Image: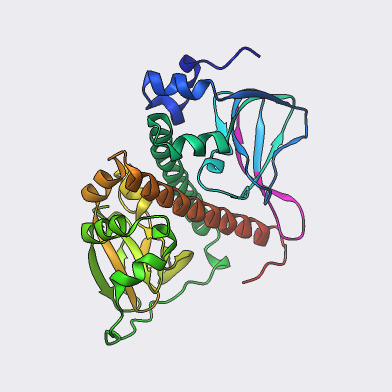
Amino acid sequence: MTPLSADQLADVPLFAGLGDAERDELATAFAPRHFADGEAILIQNERADGLYLIADGRVEIGKRLPGGGLATLAQAGPGEVIGDMALIGRDLRRSAMGIARGPVATWHLPAEQFRAALAQLRPASLQLQAALGRAIAQRIQGKTGDIAALLARWPDSFAARPQRALPPVAEDDFAAEAFLARLPCCAAMSAAQRLAFWNAGRRVDVAADRDLAAPGGDPACIWLVVRGAVRSALPHRDGIYQLTVTGPGQLVGLAPALLDSPHDRVLRSSEQTTLLAFDRAIFSEMLATGDSLARELGTSVNADLVTALDTLDQVEARIVAMRRGHAVAA
């Protein structure tokens, strides 16, 4: 294989938005790797060591099913990237299998090399971090649509969760601002950065079973869960079908805000919840500054997007397993 060029990266959606200099910088970090028919390129639950850009061949992406077998989630071919979530955080485990279907030639970008550049606030790494977030957000919305289609196809197979309409709980002396330092998304921030982060949002206390967003709604806000939990779900019959539950230190409402697209699901508090709400424009500005706060915030955004996508993959795999007659936990 000839060395990867910046022009070749320009044809790949993940890298298309980068500048010429940034693509030149990244291209030199890729190394060729070849795989035989049936060989595992990505191994579910093993440590993710980097992403692969497919030069030639076809890769089947799937998730192991309870009881055995593989639920095929996607097919990838030349010019497509797989395993890109390896660049999100340290010690990340692969969430799916990637199997070569025929001989496959790839270029490999090591995760450690990317993280080293990110730590130095190199423009290429910061731009790729933002591009990764948008790419994962698109997958989340696509996966949500796939699950909605499965629910519509087999509506009798899934019981809806009713809305409980619980009464509000009286607010106590919970010091939300001080608690911020304990949250995963803020752990690497300095005290000054946490204060700036807190001041950019507004505290919102929400009673249990209150909707923050509904399908078709304007993505004007992003929320950080400080205390409590937020459930994301699809409308199903007279209730909802739960997709994910987001707890303290995680962000919700990310995908539609990053893509400037309407909400595709219900966001509902599952208990008395304290949130830090950010105007979408302000949040986007914090992500785009190119400083260390933007790096830490971008890392948290992408980590939360990966968690959400992995959970949706599990939901889809579980539905497929149920339809195949596998015994799965409720």
Q: In the displayed structure, does residue 4 sit left or right of residue 165?
A: right
Quarter of the image for residue 43 reads top right
- Is there any visible trace of residue 10 in the rendered image? no
Q: In the displayed structure, does residue 20 sit left or right of residue 220?
A: right
Q: Which residues are magenta?
A: 62-77
Residue 173 x/y as whole percent: 28, 84
Between 286 and 73, the one lying in front of the other is 286
Q: Quadrant of the C terminus?
A: bottom right
Between 64 and 157, the one lying in front of the other is 64
Between 208 and 192, the one lying in front of the other is 192
> Magenta region's main secondary structure?
strand
Residue 262 x/y as whole percent: 30, 50
Q: In the displayed structure, does residue 244 sit left or right of residue 4?
A: left
Is residue 89 placed above or below 100 in the rendered structure?
Answer: below
Identity of the residue furthest to the top in this view: 2
- Assess whether residue 180 is covered by the magenta stretch: no
Q: Please tell me which residue is depicted at 41% across the width and 24% down the height of the picture.
A: 22
Is residue 183 placed above or below 16 in the rendered structure?
Answer: below
Q: Quadrant of the N terminus?
A: top right
- Is there any visible trace of residue 295 in the rendered image? yes
Q: Please tell me which residue is depicted at 47% across the width and 55% down the height of the picture.
A: 148
Q: How many marks?
A: 0
Quarter of the image for residue 122 reads top left
**Color style of the picture:** rainbow
Residue 5 x/y as whole percent: 51, 15
Quarter of the image for residue 209 reads bottom left
Q: In the displayed structure, does residue 249 sit left or right of residue 196?
A: right
Is residue 275 placed above or below 13 in the rendered structure?
Answer: below
Residue 191 x/y as whole percent: 32, 60
